[in-house]
Image (tube, rainbow, N blue to C red):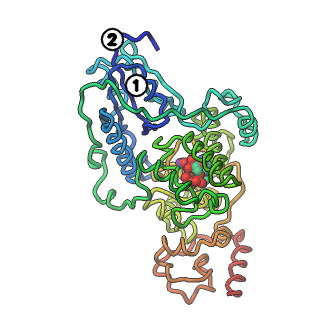
Amino acid sequence: MTKKTNQDIGLVWFKNDLRLHDNESLCNAIATGMPLLFLYCIDSNLYRPLALGFRKAGANRAIFLKQALEDLKTRLENKGAHLVIEYGMVPAIIEKYVNNYSITHIFAEQEYAWEELLQMNAVKKKITGKAELLTYWGKTLYHKDDIPFKINEIPLTSKAYRIPTGNQTEVREPFLEPSEIGGVVTINSKSFPSFKTLGFNEKEIAAVETFVAGGETEALKRLHYYTFESKLLTGYRWSRNKSLGMDYSSKLSPYLALGSLSPRIIYQKVKQYEGLVKKNQSTWWLVFELVWRDFFTFKGMRMGNAIFKTEGFTKKKVDFENDKNLFERWCNGNTGLPFVDAHMRQLNKTGYMSNRGRVNCASFLVHDYKIDWTWGAAYFESKLIDYDVSANWMNWHMQAYQIWYTNPIHQSLKYNAKEFIQQWVPELSKINDERIYIPWHEESSQIELNGYPKPAEIFSKWTRSINKILAALRDT
Ligand code: FAD
């Protein structure tokens, strides 16, 4: 940072770091002592309709973002500050504030993904010669500068990344939430715009069912609940592959995605839990998942924009069939495969889907429907309230090219998904036995399907699993 003068004015540009705890750019801005202006920009490109027939980011994400920003605004106001929320082209908004408020320094989190890096460059161009942009790494558990690999040398396999990193790297201490915010620019907070301004109609907004409430306050509550309050963490290793209810996994991903929660705070809490309650495979596994998140972030950075392309970074040539009618059935949860449809309908309504669901729905789209995986990834991007560039696109890439087929019939039986299907596929809610997994089968012919569709194709690779279900039926 250039030498500070009495005329300096800082702008804290919040992005996916919507929190006061463990926020390095915020802490550094406050430490300078310069008057600060706190800004969030909603990119007007974010909610635009895509050629595939849905928005780049849909109503679930808009609502969740609004909750996170309102919470951040309240938390800043409680410390004597403010939050100005603007909607438009991000570089133009930043330029306007730099000019109007004679901003000399901008404090922000570093970006890692393609579009966001392009946007940062556009911002830099607008402010060159007027303000200095100071960025800080904040997304991952292990700091980017501490891991034993340069980004362009990140190993291709998670194990080759995880073991040396775990052995050679310490998780940094989280930054404490600032107890007070000293000098602030005189400006009133500006609230989240109406959903109409963002381009949504009332029907789209009304169709959303909130999965978890957004914001740092709720994030910290959820973290406390999943650990010390309920002690659910102790059983996480064995419950994490389920889909029904709120308790089988942490549900911290939506908070991590917007930065309402820092991974280092989760780590700190897990370590306290290990000391005071229980240290077991589950506590290890939750940290392991955060390390996966890091790995995908760093590997995604290494691969650049290849992670968004059909051939991926492995440059595989696959002749996808791309049947638009089948894609629509998948998006709407009308494939006739109850395990897939239940998860897709939950995603559409709430913006969340379990990891088990994501694996099955992705595998089904790519390997059974033979549809370009980037269509599915774009659909998840539109819907997921925990949408994270690298977690989403790297997981999809893995399902498309680096992992074996996941059989949705086998998995519905293995993970005992009856109740989950009953909840999300009301047409089948009265079926109380294993026929719920194969409602098209002649064994289910006595059952009223209430208009629930038949699958477009029954693949021979499902036969063994169908026979297992029939055997289970005979046993009951
Ligand atoms: P928990 O099981 O409690 O895990 C704790 C945390 O670890 C999660 O919050 C998440 O931050 C991280 N994590 C867990 N599994 C993974 C994983 N496979 N990859 C990366 N991080 C992981 N996760 C996202 O956060 N955003 C996405 O956009 C996203 N898209 C996905 C798309 C596909 C096709 C697949 C298969 C997985 C995707 N995931 C994504 C990973 C995973 O499904 C979610 O992180 C998880 O379901 C979130 O629920 P949770 O917080 O209860 O997870």
Pick out the residue farthest to the front. Answer: 276
State which quarter of the image contains the C terminus.
bottom right
Q: Can I make out residue 396 in this image?
A: no
Viewer-proximal residue among 76 and 157: 76
Viewer-proximal residue among 135 and 82: 82
Residue at image x 59%, y 71%?
A: 417
Classify 129 as above or below 97: above
Q: Percent position (x, y) of residue 86?
A: 30, 35
Residue receiving disc 1: 30
Image-quadrant location for residue 239: bottom right
The three-letter code of the residue at mark 2 reads Asn
- Is label 2's Cβ within 8 Å of ligand 1? no
Q: Can I make out residue 127 in this image?
A: yes
Image-quadrant location for residue 29: top left
Viewer-proximal residue among 474 and 312: 474
- N-term mark: 1 or 2: 2
The three-letter code of the residue at mark 1 reads Ile
Q: Percent position (x, y) of residue 50?
A: 42, 47
Residue at image x 45%, y 56%?
A: 351
Q: Percent position (x, y) of residue 415?
A: 64, 69
Pick out the residue farthest to the bottom. Answer: 446
Q: CA distance from mark 1 to mark 2?
A: 15 Å
> Which secondary structure, mark 1?
helix
Q: Seen in the image, is 143 located left or right of residue 33?
A: right
Residue at image x 68%, y 45%?
A: 317
**How many residues crowd around disc 1 within 10 Å: few (fewer than 14), some, or many (20 or more)?**
many
Q: Seen in the image, is 370 located left or right of residue 344?
A: right
Q: Percent position (x, y) of residue 52?
A: 46, 51
Residue receiving disc 2: 6
Classify 265 as above or below 411: above
Viewer-proximal residue among 419 and 9: 9
